[in-house]
Amino acid sequence: MSFDKLNELLKDNGVDINDAVKTISNFQSGKIKPIETSLEHLNKATFGGLIPGMVLSIGARPSMGKTHTLHQLKNDILNKKDRNISMLLYNWEMPWFSLILIQLKKALKKSFHEILHNQPTEFELQHYKDVMEKFRDSRLTTVSKPLTPEEWNYLTREWIEKNLDKEILIVAIDHLGIVVGDDKTKSIYKLMEYENAIKLDYPSKVVFINLFQLNRQIEAIWRAKDTNPVGLRVTSEYIFSADSIMQYSDIVMAQVIPERANMEKYASVNRERYKHLEEHFADDSNTTSEYVRLKGTNRIYYDYIKRRLPEDDESNLYADILNREKEEFIRATSSKERDYTDFDDDELNF
């Protein structure tokens, strides 16, 4: 950075204060509108939805549905036809063949085998067209080649500069562990440093969505599920590259599907504090206890490990019942996932 640019940093802090007041005013007047998602708990945690300047990081073990959640958010974003929005998706792990095939299965109500071994009827071709149009949305740009942090930073900034006329820009990465580098931890840290710099350079323009993996060690905790049911919930110690993810993210959310970890029951929670999860409480003979276990079968749990501006009266654990469509997507994606927390750095080079 030149000395002239460094001197510009010594400006009156009143400029930043005025900008902050203007941002609050723009929220109040409706000039800044969050992108509402289909995850109600995420809307609550983010003051109404995805907001410019936000870094949202979503973590899980392989086969726990993080890619499904990202594509659910992608559909939410691109369904806002009345919003001047663009999205850049670094789709580094899940093959497009699988993503498209899953959407065709959803639209046609057919098995993968039937789709792949039969020519579509004239009626079904319309469903094909609808599915393909969603993936070919002109507001969506995709990059499938894994990059170094420096390459990612250059390409992302170039894309942002070309789309500054848009209301909101969304940059998503599936997932951080696939960034190219000799040392994965350092590479992830560098990439998130770049994210933070971009966020500061374009404070009212860009939303980041990162996917990451939880460490394998948490599976040992889940296998010892009867020893400490309260301790089954995800904490920051089980996040791969936790230092960078916890430091630079505004929201850190972990996903757990207990059934995938062979848990018929999940964590133990306070009955009163988590009354909103009452339909997920497991049958328990000790109904007078302050704590209750959660059902494991056919459930997915969303645990907020970090919220930069939490509401005092909000809980940080939410749940959803898995429907068949979501289960099929998660099952199909899980077969493509590698565990990037279980290799030495030199094994992870590309």
Image (tube, grey):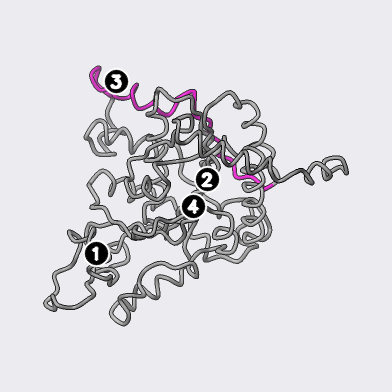
Whole-number angstrom distance, CA of label 2 to CA of label 1:
31 Å
Tell me the residue that label 3 is attached to: 125
- Amino acid type assigned to the residue bearing label 4 in the image: Ser
Residue range in magenta is 120-149
Answer with mark 3 or mark 4, whichever residue precedes in sequence.
4
Q: Which mark is residue 54?
A: 2
Answer with mark 4 or mark 1, whichever residue precedes in sequence.
4
Locate residue 243: give its quadrant: bottom right
Q: Residue at x 38, y 59 (%)?
A: 312
Q: Which mark is residue 296?
A: 1
Q: Position of residue 304 (x, y in %)?
A: 41, 59
Answer with mark 3 or mark 1, whichever residue precedes in sequence.
3
Tell me the residue that label 4 is attached to: 57
Answer with mark 2 or mark 3, whichever residue precedes in sequence.
2
- Amino acid type assigned to the residue bearing label 2 in the image: Met
Whole-number angstrom distance, CA of label 3 to CA of label 1:
39 Å
Residue furthest top in the image: 122
Q: Which of label 4 and label 1 is nearer to you?
A: 4
Q: Residue at x 24, y 64 (%)?
A: 296
Between residues 337 and 321, which one lies in front from this camera angle?
321
Q: Which of label 2 and label 3 is nearer to you?
A: 2
Classify 15 as above or below 257.
Answer: above
